[in-house]
Amino acid sequence: MRLSIFKNRVFPIIIVFVLVMISCGSKSKNDSAQNNEILKQVQDDSNSKFSDDIIVAANRTDAYLPLLKGKRVGIIANQTSVVFKEIASSQVYQNDNYTHLVDTLLQRNVNIKKVFAPEHGFRGKADAGELVKDGIDTKTNLPIVSLYGKNKKPSPEQLADLDVVIFDIQDVGARFYTYISSLHYVMEACAEANIPVIILDRPNPNGNYIDGPILEPAHKSFVGMHPIPVVHGMTIGEYAKMINGQGWLENKITCDITVIEMQNYAHDKTYNLPIKPSPNLPNDKSINLYPSLCFFEGTNVNAGRGTSKQFQIYGSPYLDKTVYSFKYIPMPNEGAKYPKHDGILCYGEDLSERKNLNQIDLSYLIKAYKNSIDKKIFFNDFFTNLAGTKALRMQIESGVSEKEIKETWVDGLKKFRTVRAQYLIYE
């Protein structure tokens, strides 16, 4: 441990001290200037090589501000699109420790023309599935164009006054989390308009594993557009490269993308999201459980919406109360104006204290189906969209075990890993 501290902190300081002494002993102004440049380089190298803190791409303004000079800029952003004032190893930030990307760029005199808002809106307040309306941002007076509702793809008219588009949204690494669908449509529209896209990369909090059934083309929807598993293990930047490389845009066109990479990120590195990515993912536990519990959105089971433990509990008035001792009543709140089973007592499980998952856990879904008092109304049509296949519902209804279900995913996941490897930016 002491050796590590010496290498990370003390060794760079010694180098700087030696160079300062050399600089002081020199009579030549040119030599002094040269040494000062070396000092700066040593300090910069020290900061980058010996720090383990993840630096998100939005903080690397030196890498993308030159690309915006003299350009008319559009930004796809939400409440997670921020620039941090300092980097903390815990990734826990106070509200005054960051500024929104839009505000940051305006302060740098970047010519922002408009903001495009995905699901949940620019400030992240809308319910899941709620129509996001066009409007004006009251803080900046910039026009806001909705990319959720009828207008999921920017129109040529909406892009006509732009030279470049920035995409900066925190993802959670699940196929049915719709920000990667918005990414697809933005890339497609910009490719058709011959407008380059700059992607500011952010960590994937579920980037340490890959799991789930591969989406079948027949079940393509906004909650699943591409033949990938439920948990894909890629960052937004890596995923954009895959969209291009696999020819998934309309007519196999290719978008001109520039991915601004993070520093010090790896897929197996833990990252605590400092800002909740959407109203119903309030903390790290909900984000970890989301790929497993989101299947309940396609059933008559409430997944915690209308409570303070969204995607950390589940329950339904149609589950056997002799099996489930945990109970709660969903009530309207931020992000859930009309929660499933609003005001009705639900029986289920509290998973908020469970150990973090590194795979999809189907046991909760299977258990709920087995203990449903009316199996005929357990599933709805949305379930197939979420699963990306009809097979999962059929397997559960037939009593297939979780182990047997997962065995049917193996070949698809193996093929996906091979494709995915072509587009990885980080270890």
Image (spheres, rainbow, N blue to C red):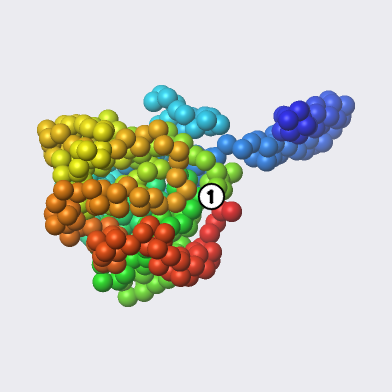
Question: Could you tell me which secondary element the residue under label 1 belongs to?
Answer: loop
Q: Look at 29% across and 61% down and name the residue there.
A: 399
Quarter holding the C terminus?
A: bottom right
Q: For the view shown, which residue lies furthest in the front direction?
A: 322
Left/right placement of residue 383 relative to residue 414 reads: left
Q: Look at 37% across and 43% down and name the residue there.
A: 289
- Give residue 2's position: percent from left, percent from top: 76, 28
Residue 426 vs residue 31, the one in the foreground? 426
Residue 358 sits above or below residue 192 on the image:
above
- Give residue 291's position: percent from left, percent from top: 36, 50
Mark 1: few/some/many CA within 10 Å (<14, 14-19, 20+): many
Left/right placement of residue 181 relative to residue 337 reads: right
Occupied quadrant, residue 269:
top right
Residue 217 vs residue 118, the one in the foreground? 217
Residue 81 sits above or below residue 227 on the image:
above
Number of numbered markers = 1
Q: Amino acid at mark 1?
A: His
Left/right placement of residue 81 relative to residue 365 reads: right
- Give residue 159's position: percent from left, percent from top: 28, 57
Residue 88 sits above or below residue 371 on the image:
above
User: Which residue is label 1 attached to?
Assistant: 267
Q: Look at 40% across and 67% down and name the residue there.
A: 408
Q: Is residue 290 visible?
A: yes
Residue 378 sits above or below residue 92 on the image:
below
Quarter holding the N terminus?
A: top right
Left/right placement of residue 25 relative to residue 289 reads: right
Q: Look at 31% across and 40% down and name the residue there.
A: 311
- Give residue 284's position: percent from left, percent from top: 41, 37
Occupied quadrant, residue 17:
top right
Q: Is residue 165 visible?
A: no
